[in-house]
């Protein structure tokens, strides 16, 4: 029995001696001997004492478990609080020390502020599901890849048509802001005031009467001079119309002639481009130019000789002299312009005054022209018609009211007059279309029996 009791004592003494020789870290790091070897660099690196570093890291881990983060990373407002009032109930909320609490209970009650690591996936730790591609993104990707896609009624959309390429057609501002404003609510959106341009209305300058008095030459018994003047004006207008019609006819004749020439070329030379004559050599015939090229080869192009250093220096010196002369001439011109600055200022002032005077004259002439209406001016796409002149020849004059014949059209005169006064916009004449089919007339059988009662 004595031998059995001495064996554990020897074992305990040996283990205590080993503990004295070794020093182990509290965090579970492998123990190192107190008397370490210093033979070689490897031993120095292996046996270095890192206990202060491990102690500092362990202190940081304790701070993280207690507060949830490192204290050095927290703000002062989170760590300190100035209590100016005090709380009497704080003692009741603090836990009381009890010796009856077991050590295991104390250990379990110390909860770490660091969130635990879950082995099972949770709602927050699950990876996000891949979002489904929207219809617009899918259409855009198919359009960029030139892939066929179905449109309305199951038809395939052609990727080559306008607006179906890789270039995206952005939505308008109205479509982007759709739904933001409810028309049934009382709060109306703020109105943006748009400043209208300061332009004079041409109607304000027109002083033409609604029913202007006719020319005295259009009377049934006019004076000779007034009648001749009105006839001359009507004659000039007709001549201008005939001249314009002749120009249009000449242009049309040129087009017809060109078409005839092209048609003749197509008939004469059905192969090739119209207007090009193709010369096909006969059998055994060789072009003279080709024979000359084969007989006399072109001389080789002589390359320029390489310049020497002396020639390069001379060329550089000549360029520098030209550059210096150009700079000197530019400097001299600048000094001359500086000396004549007053003259230039006066000349510019005269030019500006002349331009302003011409502008005022043009504006006055335009306003003077507007007083007589918009006849003959282009408004938009169309020209305001000047109207027709109602005049009779000398032999057509009745010289009395009994033989007077009605002429002109009051409705046409009033309509053109409203266009001259900028009350109606001008437009192209739209004559009535002729009926495509002729009206057939039938004679009923009852019409033939007009002599019978029934």
Image (spheres, rainbow, N blue to C red):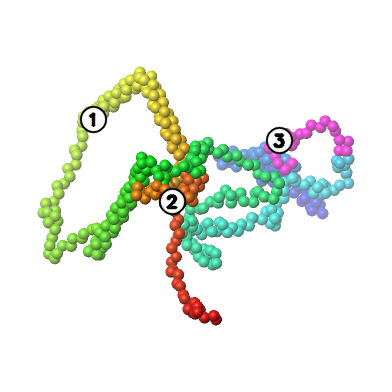
Residue at mark 1:
315
Disc sitting over residue 402 in the figure: 2
What secondary structure is found at the residue carrying circle 3? loop
Query: Where are the magenta residues, as a range?
Result: 67-91
Q: Residues within 10 Å of mark 3 (few under 14, many from 20)?
A: few
Q: Gap between marks 2 and 1, in whole Å?
A: 103 Å
Dividing the image into 4 quarters, which one contains the C terminus?
bottom right
Horizontal side, residue 2 vs residue 212: left or right: right
Could you tell which of marks 3 and 1 lies nearer the N-terminus?
A: 3
x 49%, y 48%: residue: 414
What secondary structure is found at the residue carrying circle 2? loop
x 20%, y 33%: residue: 308
Dividing the image into 4 quarters, which one contains the N terminus?
bottom right
Question: To which quarter of the image does residue 188 belong?
Answer: top right
- Foreground pick, 85 / 56: 85
Tell me residue 185's x, y (percent): 70, 48
Does residue 316 show up?
yes
x 36%, y 20%: residue: 343
Could you tell which of marks 2 and 1 lies nearer the N-terminus?
A: 1
Tell me residue 409's x, y (percent): 46, 51
- Foreground pick, 117 / 304: 304
- Foreground pick, 306 / 408: 408
What secondary structure is found at the residue carrying circle 1? helix
On screen, 280 above or below 181? below
Q: Does 76 appear in magenta? A: yes
Q: Gap between marks 2 and 3, in whole Å?
A: 115 Å
Tell me residue 110's x, y (percent): 79, 46
- Foreground pick, 330 / 100: 330
Q: Mark 1 and mark 2 in contact (Cβ < 8 Å)?
A: no
Tell me residue 145's x, y (percent): 48, 58
Horizontal side, residue 254 vs residue 284: left or right: right
Residue at mark 3:
75
């Amino acid at each position: 029995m004595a031998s059995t009791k001495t064996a554990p004592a020897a074992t305990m003494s040996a283990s205590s001696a080993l503990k004295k020789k070794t020093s182990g870290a509290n965090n579970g790091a492998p123990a190192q001997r107190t008397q370490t070897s210093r033979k070689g660099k490897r031993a120095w690196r292996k046996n270095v004492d890192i206990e202060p570093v491990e102690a500092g890291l362990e202190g940081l881990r304790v701070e993280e478990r207690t507060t949830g983060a490192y204290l050095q990373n927290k703000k002062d407002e989170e760590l300190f609080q100035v209590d100016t009032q005090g709380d009497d109930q704080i003692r009741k909320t603090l836990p009381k020390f009890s010796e009856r609490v077991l050590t295991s209970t104390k250990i379990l009650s110390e909860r770490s502020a660091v969130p635990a690591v879950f082995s099972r996936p949770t709602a927050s730790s699950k990876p996000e599901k891949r979002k489904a591609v929207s219809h617009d993104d899918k259409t855009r990707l198919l359009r960029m890849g030139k892939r066929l896609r179905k449109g309305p009624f199951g038809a395939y959309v052609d990727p080559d048509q306008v607006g179906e390429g890789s270039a995206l057609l952005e939505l308008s501002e109205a479509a982007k802001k759709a739904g933001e404003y409810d028309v049934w609510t009382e709060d109306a959106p703020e109105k943006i005031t748009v400043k209208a341009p300061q332009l004079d209305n041409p109607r304000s300058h027109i002083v033409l009467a609604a029913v202007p008095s006719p020319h005295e030459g259009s009377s049934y018994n006019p004076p000779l001079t007034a009648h001749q003047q009105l006839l001359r004006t009507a004659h000039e207008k007709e001549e201008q119309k005939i001249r314009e019609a002749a120009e249009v006819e000449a242009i049309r004749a040129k087009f017809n002639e060109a078409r005839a020439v092209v048609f003749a070329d197509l008939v004469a030379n059905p192969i090739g481009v119209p207007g090009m004559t193709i010369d096909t050599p006969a059998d055994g015939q060789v072009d003279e130019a080709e024979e000359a090229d084969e007989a006399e080869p072109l001389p080789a192009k002589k390359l320029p000789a390489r310049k020497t250093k002396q020639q390069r220096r001379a060329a550089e010196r000549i360029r520098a002299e030209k550059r210096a002369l150009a700079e000197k001439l530019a400097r001299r011109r600048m000094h001359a312009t500086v000396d004549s600055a007053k003259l230039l200022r006066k000349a510019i002032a005269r030019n500006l005054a002349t331009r302003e005077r011409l502008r005022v004259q043009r504006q006055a002439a335009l306003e003077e022209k507007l007083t007589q209406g918009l006849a003959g001016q282009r408004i938009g796409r169309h020209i305001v018609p000047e109207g027709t002149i109602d005049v009779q020849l000398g032999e057509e004059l009745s010289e009395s009211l009994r033989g007077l014949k009605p002429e002109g059209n009051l409705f046409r005169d009033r309509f053109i007059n409203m266009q001259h006064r900028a009350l109606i916009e001008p437009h192209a004449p739209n004559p009535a279309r002729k009926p495509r089919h002729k009206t057939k007339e039938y004679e009923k059988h009852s019409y033939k029996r007009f002599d019978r009662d029934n």
